[in-house]
Amino acid sequence: MSQLAVFKEQSPTQAVLNTNEQAVISSELSKVGVRFEQWQTTTEITTDMTQDDILSAYQADIKRLQTEGGYQTVDVISLAKGNPSASQLRAKFLFEHTHSEDEVRFFVKGQGLFCLHINAFVYQVLCQQGDLISVPMNTPHWFDMGSDPEFTAIRLFNNEQGWVAKSTESNIAERFPLLD
C-alpha cells in the first residue's frame, strides 16, 4: 500500500503526517508540485513479459504523459530479488541530488521510496505497484530501493541521456529512515 510520511527536516524520527490514503497522498504532494497517480491496466503483468509488452499494457497513460510533458524517451527498469549488485545499486541513489528534468516513474511491480526535500520538510513517498510519481526538475531528493530490492518501473525522460543526477553535497539523506 502506498504511503506518505512528512517530516520537518530537523526531526527525522517524528512524522508530522503519516498516511496511506491515496487521496490525501495526491493532495499533499500536489501542494508542493509533485504529481502522484494510480494507474490500472487490464493486462496481467507477468515475469516473462518483455519491455515492449509492459509498455504496451500502459500505452494510453504513457502517451498522455508524453503529450503533457514532452517526454522523448521511455524505458523499463527491472531489478529482481537476490541481485548480487543490490547494495551497489542502492548506494547509487541514496544521496540527495537534483535533475535538470522531471523524474517520472511508474511502478509496475514492487516498491521504492522517494524522499523529497522541499522547503523545510522531507516527504517520504513509498511507491508501490500502480503508483506514478513525477518529481519536478531541480527538486532535491533521494531514492531507496531497499536492501533486497524487487521492482519494475517505467521511466520517462525529456532527454536521450536518461538518468543524470547532480549532487546537492548535503548529507540529509543519511539522517532519515530507509526501507528495510
Image (tube, rainbow, N blue to C red):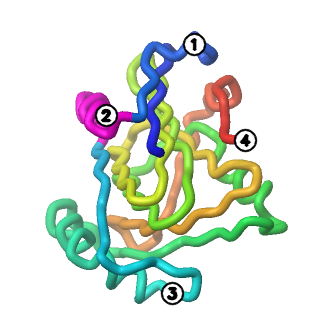
Q: What residue type is labelled 3?
A: Met
Question: Closer to the N terminus: mark 3 or mark 2?
Answer: 2
Residue depicted at x 17% and y 68%: 64
The residue located at (37%, 50%) in the rendering is 133
Please state the horizontal and vertical placement of residue 132, each as a whole percent of the image: 36, 55
Residue beneath disc 4: 180
31 falls in the magenta region: yes
Q: Distance between the residues labelled 3 and 2?
A: 32 Å
Of label 1 and label 3, which has the lower sequence position?
1
Which of pointers 1 and 4 lies earlier in the amino acid sequence? Answer: 1
Q: How far apart are marks 4 and 3 (CA)?
A: 28 Å
Which residue lies under the disc numbered 3?
A: 49
Residue position marked by numbered label 1 in the rendering:
14
Q: Position of residue 173 (x, y in %)?
A: 63, 31
Please tell me how crowded label 3 is: few (under 14), some (14-19), or many (20+) other residues with Cα within 10 Å. few
Residue type marked 4: Asp
Give the amino acid type for the residue marked by disc 1 in the picture.
Gln
The quadrant of the picture occupied by the C terminus is: top right
The residues tagged by marks 1 and 4 sit, at their Cα atoms, a distance apart of 18 Å
Q: Distance between the residues labelled 1 and 2?
A: 19 Å
Q: Residue 123 carries which label?
A: none
What element does badge 4 sit on? Answer: loop
User: What amino acid is labelled 2 in the image?
Assistant: Leu
Label 1: element kind: loop
Q: Does the magenta stretch include residue 42?
A: no
Sequence-first disc among 4 and 2: 2
- Between 27 and 100, the one nearer to me in the picture: 27
| Residue position for label 2 | 29
Q: Is mark 3 on a helix, strand or loop?
A: loop
Q: Is 104 rendered above or below residue 146?
A: below
